[in-house]
């Protein structure tokens, strides 16, 4: 770029300015006291004393002066680096604008230091003042004149430099010419070449030219280029930067065509020789295509290597790790069948609520008929009592919220107590709010408890079996205990789960992602960031087991049976769910395992009957498991059941990426019963649950979602309902009405009433949160008081919208 500047700015910015900066740097470093003394001067006729002619600097002042000199030196080298390396006009102009602003500040600071009388006494200025004011003003004026175009437009690179570049890129240009003559460049390059097409055969034939012929052609073209140098140089001087850049980009585009052809040719010859339909080595081709993109002066963009042109880029982040293309086309029918036959059997079995073969056309008719039967007293007493459960199945909460609670931080999780008398909301600010919900339609805030010295966020919370204690965790190795009794105003206390027994093989603290009480309330089990499960005896205040049972973070734990403290599950980012028996944890060996997810597990929930378990996975699926179908520990090791996910060759970052559907595959050892799909598990550890027996007859499973909805499924994997929390909170967000981002992380369904609470992250950067209450309602309006959609703050006081 330096050679393209007009002559005067070129000399000033690339020669004069670096020298002047070095002239200030050297004395500041080598003679700091003299340098400091020269920053001011004596006016003519004034009496000069020795103390005024010398500067005595303290240690800190010496250090600051030398640091100033080092800054001058850095500025000099930055000037040389920018002006002599970049060819981008915008970069140089922005760099000069920054210096132009600094020129103003330098002069103003100097004038303020000297005072007005010395600043205008130009005849008395010393060399340092001429540098601080005179040279800086000269640079300022030169930059201003350059910006205004007084020196003319930026010129073309010199002929010698152009010839040098032509020679250094000679093979690239020659190769491009070969490609353009024998195989013209199309307007658009497809992601892959059809081997049966004429274009592919022509390219393949061209690439088979022997090496000697290629070299002869290169030599011949080289001689012709030398003969035409003078004419081309004359034309080049008339071109501007844009013309050159366009020529360079076109050449790189031709190179990309050649690279794709080479990639496919190599793959066809050396990768899948037994497969006539092989498309070549995908990884090699992608690397070469990425190289061509960089040569073109562009940044790799999301989706640029995808096969699917309809991929939704708007919902995703621009930087992500991409997969490698599969060697063989994926089966479009690889996804689980919906409706699920196994799920249908479960619906008819009675394990998931009453099943009525008489099914009217709509839910409304079904519910109306049952209410009529009950009011008319039809059937036996037992029959009338049994009508209640099918009625409860039809009372699914609607999108329109009864109430929206606003928080200043995202809500991490929120659940009702087993009796439905209170609800807790864990918020990222390390505080847990507790609400009296004995009347589920008239809440009352009664307590807020705090996790002391929390780290980043709260991660989980659990209630003791008697609902008297709340255990909640952060990214620390301690669990905080708080009483739920409104009359107990005592402070929470902490239990340290990190073991002091070095025989367990663990030292130091760790993060806790999940915590649960055992059925008898005596033990806690925690999943940690140390790839381990911790079992803690509450009464003895001691860690009794600390087992490294996974190959990655343990994101979720739970007990199989609410009444038993023995069988527990753990779900990990290593894509497995393991079954443990606390009576045999000492040997560190799992009792069984579930495999089927092809990405990490975000959450697991037990039905509480010692048999069924539900899991959410980052592969955008939710799975139902039966303990009787768990893989034994010996089979798990013999089959190496974790290998398909351990060696899958693709890393999905759920925090920022959207999961590519073509990366999903059916696990060869999948032992799940039903797979549920449709929601998005992204951004955080999205949670899933079984619907409660009291308010839904255990009929459904449900989950939050990254798209701001609550998904409710029948057991046969068909979608029963979708509650749009994003739409419900769109017009009532406090302080950020234009940021339409909602992520539902957790959902709590009331155990007795037909309502649920969606705990959500709100805002473009998840800077706030809501807990929205949704109830069964056939209409979007309600004549009762207060009206639906009431917005309140964390203490349930009416909240005023800020817009």
Image (tube, rainbow, N blue to C red):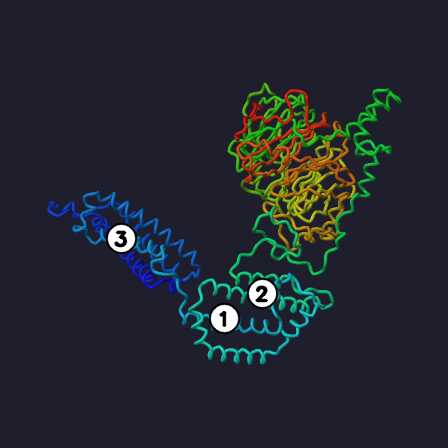
Can residue 496 be seen by looking at this rendering? no
Q: CA distance from mark 1 to mark 3?
A: 45 Å
Image-quadrant location for residue 737 = top right
Q: Give left or right: position of 678 versus 424.
A: right
Which one is in front, 156 or 36? 156
Q: Which mark is residue 549?
A: none
Q: Residue at x 69, y 70 (%)?
A: 198
Dot 3: element: helix
Q: CA distance from mark 2 to mark 1?
A: 15 Å
The single residue placed furthest to the top in the displayed view is 487
Image-quadrant location for residue 542 = top right
Dot 1: element: loop
Q: Which mark is residue 28?
A: 3
Q: Position of residue 186 (x, y in %)?
A: 62, 66
Q: CA distance from mark 2 to mark 3?
A: 52 Å
Compared to residue 232, the image places residue 305 above or below, namely above
Disc 2 marks which residue? 256
Which one is in front, 420 or 604? 420
Disc 1 marks which residue? 169
């Amino acid at each position: 770029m330096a050679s393209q500047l007009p002559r005067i700015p070129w000399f000033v910015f690339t020669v004069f300015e670096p020298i002047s900066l070095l002239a200030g740097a050297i004395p500041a470093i080598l003679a700091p006291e003299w340098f400091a003394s020269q920053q001011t001067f004596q006016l003519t006729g004034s009496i000069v004393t020795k103390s005024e002619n010398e500067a005595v600097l303290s240690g800190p002042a010496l250090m600051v002066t030398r640091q100033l000199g080092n800054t001058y030196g850095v500025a000099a080298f930055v000037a040389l680096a920018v002006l002599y390396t970049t060819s981008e006009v915008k970069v140089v102009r922005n760099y000069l604008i920054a210096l132009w602003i600094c020129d103003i500040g330098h002069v103003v600071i100097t004038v303020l230091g000297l005072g007005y009388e010395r600043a205008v006494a130009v005849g008395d200025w010393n060399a340092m003042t001429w540098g601080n004011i005179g040279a800086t003003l000269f640079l300022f004026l030169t930059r201003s004149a350059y910006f205004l175009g007084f020196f003319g437009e930026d010129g073309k690179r010199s002929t010698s430099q152009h010839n040098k570049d032509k020679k250094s890129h000679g093979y690239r240009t020659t190769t491009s010419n070969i490609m353009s003559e024998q195989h013209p460049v199309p307007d658009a390059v497809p992601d892959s070449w059809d081997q049966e097409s004429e274009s592919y055969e022509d390219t393949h034939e061209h690439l088979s030219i022997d090496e000697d012929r290629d070299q002869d052609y290169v030599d011949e073209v080289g001689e012709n280029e030398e003969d035409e140098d003078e004419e081309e140089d004359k034309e080049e001087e008339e071109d501007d930067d844009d013309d050159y850049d366009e020529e360079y980009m076109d050449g790189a585009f031709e190179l990309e065509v050649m690279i794709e052809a080479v990639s496919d040719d190599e793959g066809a010859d050396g990768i899948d020789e037994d497969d006539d339909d092989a498309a070549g080595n995908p990884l090699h081709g992608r690397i070469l295509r990425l190289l061509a993109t960089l040569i073109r002066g562009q940044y790799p963009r999301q989706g640029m290597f995808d096969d699917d042109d309809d991929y939704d880029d708007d919902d995703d982040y621009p930087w992500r790790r991409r997969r490698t293309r599969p060697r063989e086309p994926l089966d479009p029918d690889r996804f689980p069948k919906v409706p699920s036959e196994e799920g249908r059997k479960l619906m008819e079995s009675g394990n998931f609520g009453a099943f009525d073969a008489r099914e009217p056309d709509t839910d409304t008719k079904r519910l109306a008929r049952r209410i009529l039967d009950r009011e008319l007293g039809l059937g036996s007493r037992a029959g009338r009592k049994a009508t209640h459960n099918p009625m409860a199945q039809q009372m699914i909460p609607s999108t329109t919220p009864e109430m929206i609670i606003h928080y200043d931080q995202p809500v991490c999780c929120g659940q009702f107590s087993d009796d439905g008398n209170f609800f807790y909301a864990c918020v990222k600010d390390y505080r847990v709010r507790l609400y009296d919900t004995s009347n589920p339609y008239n809440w009352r805030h009664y307590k807020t408890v705090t996790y002391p010295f929390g780290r980043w966020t709260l991660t989980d919370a659990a209630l003791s079996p008697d609902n008297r204690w709340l255990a909640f965790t952060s990214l620390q190795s301690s669990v905080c205990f708080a009483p739920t009794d409104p009359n107990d105003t005592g402070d929470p206390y902490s239990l340290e789960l990190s073991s002091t027994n070095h025989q367990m093989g663990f030292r130091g603290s760790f993060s806790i992602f999940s915590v649960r009480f055992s059925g008898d309330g005596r033990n806690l089990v925690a999943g940690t960031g140390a790839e381990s499960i911790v079992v803690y005896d509450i009464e003895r205040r001691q860690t009794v087991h600390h087992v490294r049972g996974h190959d990655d973070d343990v994101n979720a734990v739970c007990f199989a049976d609410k009444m038993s403290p023995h069988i527990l599950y753990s779900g990990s980012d290593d894509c497995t769910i393991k079954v443990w028996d606390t009576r045999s944890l000492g040997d560190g060996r799992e009792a069984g395992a579930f495999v089927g997810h092809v990405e990490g597990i975000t959450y697991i929930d037990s039905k509480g009957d010692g048999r069924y378990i539900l899991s959410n996975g980052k592969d955008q699926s939710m799975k139902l498991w039966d303990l009787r179908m768990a893989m034994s520990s010996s089979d798990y090791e013999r089959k190496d059941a974790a290998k398909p996910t351990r060696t899958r060759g693709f890393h999905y970052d759920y925090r920022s990426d959207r999961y590519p559907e073509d990366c999903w595959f059916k696990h060869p050892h999948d032992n799940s019963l039903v797979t549920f799909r449709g929601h998005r598990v992204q951004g955080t550890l999205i949670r899933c649950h079984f619907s409660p027996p009291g308010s839904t007859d255990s009929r459904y499973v449900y989950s939050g979602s990254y798209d701001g909805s609550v998904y409710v499924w029948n057991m046969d994997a068909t979608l029963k309902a979708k509650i749009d929390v994003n739409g419900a909170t769109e017009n009532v967000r406090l302080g950020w009405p234009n940021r339409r981002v909602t992520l539902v992380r957790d959902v709590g369904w009331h155990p007795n009433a037909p309502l649920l609470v969606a705990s959500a992250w709100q805002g473009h950067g998840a800077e706030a949160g809501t807990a929205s209450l949704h109830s069964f309602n056939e209409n979007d309006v309600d004549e009762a008081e207060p009206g639906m959609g009431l917005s309140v703050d964390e203490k349930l006081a009416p909240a005023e919208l800020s817009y």
